[in-house]
Amino acid sequence: MKEEPAQGPAQNSPENASPGQDGEVAPPVSAGPAETTELGVDDIRRALSARAAQPGSTDERLDAERDARSYLSRFAQSRITGERVYGGDHIEVLLGQGRRSVRAYQLSAQDVDLVSSAFLPPASYDDLLRDSEPFRVVLLSGARGHGKYAVAQRLLLERGHAILQCLEPDADLTRLDESSLRPGHGYLLQELGPDGTAAPLTGFELHRLNSVMRARNCRLVITLRDGVRTADPELGKQTFPVNGPPAPWDVFERHLRWWLGPQRTRRAEELLRAPETATLFTEAQSAGTSLARAAENARLLSESSAAPADAVRQVREHGSVRDAEEFEKWFNGLDDLPTQCVAVATAVFGGEAYETVSALATSLGRRLQPPPTAEHPERPRNEAVVATRATRLRRLNASLVGAQVASRHGGVPAKVVRFDDSRTAARVLQNVWEEYDILRHELPGWLKACAGHELATVRTRAAVAVGFLAELSFDSLRTGVLQPWARSPVRALREAAATALVIAAETPELAAPVRDLIQAWASGDAVLRATAARAWTALRRSDAGSADEAVALLDTLAATDSAEIIEAICLGVTESLAATDGHEARDALHLLRHWISRRDVQRRTVGELSFLFAAADLLEDMPADGGGTHRRWPKLLALATRDPVHQRDIALLWDAVLQSPETYEAATQVLTEWARMVDADAAGRRALARLLHAAAPTDRSRRFLLRHVATWNTPDSRAARSAGQILSHLDSKGSTP
């Protein structure tokens, strides 16, 4: 997935970097003097043409960041149950397309049969089943370990939903609409809490979800994190407690018998009677065993053919990755360097294809181990190759997962690697950083190299990992990674620094240091100021900053003729307009209006170019029309349609760029692409006509718009229907008073 560069020749950007020999991660490719050539505003205008012709770059980058957050920063830290979230027969799918996609995985037939046959209801289940019947969206509350996830699955099956989809942990529920749901499916969302990266659930959104689910004969069950309270009364009406859980031993017994099946009843009795099995529940470290842990222990025990004592020991060893006090023992048990490196690479790049993760692991191994010599070869001659992929993944408790990787041109099937236990990634990184001096010494340099990888998703995951590690050692990563990235002439590395700071700023203890660093960059040279502009949202999202401070920073930086800074502001504003937080998009639009209304030529130019970047690049998948047709609109057109205040702001911005001698050529090209995008969609054509009527407040602007739109009114323009709609609307309404 490539992002169109705004600077010079394409070979200078990391998108075109090549892997080094033997799988080594190469640094960004240098093309000689061209790489250090200062950008010009004309380069940015040319980049606008590329974005208008192939939009979606910002959406792709944000989707990759969101997935990396979900896997590592949020998902790995917040999930506390012992269920296998990925692996086995679970297949990842995408609900929706592009920016509105939500990742999910379909529960296998085996999982469904397990909850159908081995489920033990809590005491409150009958009341819950009765009282939740009218609702299409149900929230389940209750203490950790009470089996909320199993109750959620059973509830959906009881309602007749035979196919169950589990949404990604930080799924943005605002992205779920009729076009993205599979008719008749049941949907699950685990451990919803207030600190995720997606928009919070509100009573208004809950009402919309009920309507959407009913229209597609679907249901959604959401389990709330332990301690979460629903203050909104609308949420409270659809929140039901899970109380009176069954005993862990009863769950264990029921699941063990199910896994062994009727043909192995004698084996089940042998294991259940063995005193060693009872120690899984009676020893001090097993006190308070959750129902999920009991069910997982049953599955693991059923897979062993050893004597009960040995089988129980194997269960304990497998469970070591779930217990903090035994985690180091598990990692130390990975007694060869390649497997340890695959563990670290999976922690950072889980969700990438196994081949990619393996190559990145090899590059880390070469940093840790000197190159082989004739006297000390890496592997003796004629030695068998025994470390197979399957063996290594079993040792790591990881799995290959069938996935659909999002791209601008549709889903691409792939096999990606993830840890079975969602908490393992965070634990591996933390353990490596805190306990292994050699690995800690090499990790920053390795992540810096990975940020120059040819794959945009790899670059983004490397940046998210740096943001995660910053909580453990901010000063070390600031000097070793963030500062070199921030000073880099390569835009992708400056973006990596900004991404890492946005992640780090979400840790309250780092909010002030992140703020100070961004402010220091804002006072530096043009390259550092460009990095500060890319990281501006970290100020509004941290405890030490504010929206006003972030806007003030960007306003100060906008007084420039440096193309590097202008480009960074354009990209930063575009990401803010793509954010799920409506306040952030509102502030960005107000700032653009402020700039274009100024007599300050520099700020006005920055405002016009920033608006056009967002207009050219951002997309939104709209709900299907009456015939079920998928519709893709420019995101700013969708914003204008939903909100009259946004429509006023966006209309004024269109009027400004169409009347500006600096940007009118780029503006007409972007507007033409808008018209082509909605040409086959009657609702889109009407929305565009209304917006352009508001964007022509004077006779002069109306005449200019009419002349340009008339050029589309030809059979081969791909925007003829849009032209007819707009011309008819303008003729009937006249100029705006």
Image (cartoon, rainbow, N blue to C red):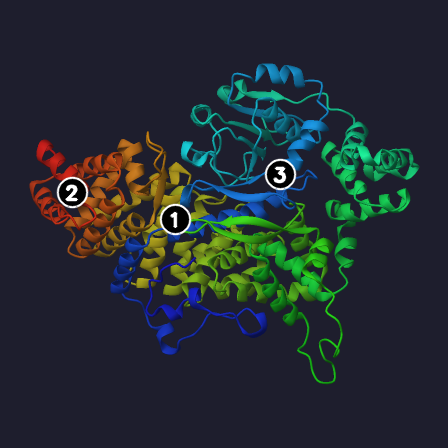
For the residues labelled 2 and 3, the Cα–Cα distance comes to: 49 Å
Residue 255, by quadrant, is top right
Question: Label 1, label 3: how many angstroms apart (C-alpha)?
Answer: 36 Å
Residue annotated with mark 3: 108
> Which element is circle 2 on?
helix
Residue depicted at x 10% and y 40%: 698
Q: Which numbered disc, 2 or 3, marks the residue that appears first in the sequence?
A: 3
Instruction: Residue 413 in the image: state x and y as whole percent.
Output: 51, 51
Q: Please tell me how crowded label 1 is: few (under 14), some (14-19), or many (20+) other residues with Cα within 10 Å.
A: many
Q: Where is residue 141 shown, x and y percent of the image?
A: 62, 25
SS for dot 3: loop
Q: Is residue 458 left or right of residue 177?
A: right
**For this rendering, which residue is in front, 262 or 34?**
262
Query: Foreground mark, 1 or 2?
Result: 2
Relative to 349, does residue 238 appear above or below in the rendering? above
Q: Is residue 17 visible?
A: yes
Q: Residue at x 25, y 39 (%)?
A: 649
Type of amino acid under label 3: Ser
Classify mark 3: residues with Cα within 10 Å, few (<14), some (14-19) or many (20+). Answer: some
The disc placed on residue 723 is: 2
Query: Residue beneath label 1, please?
Result: 575
- The image quadrant that residue 5 belongs to is bottom left
Report whether 337 appears left or right of 526: right
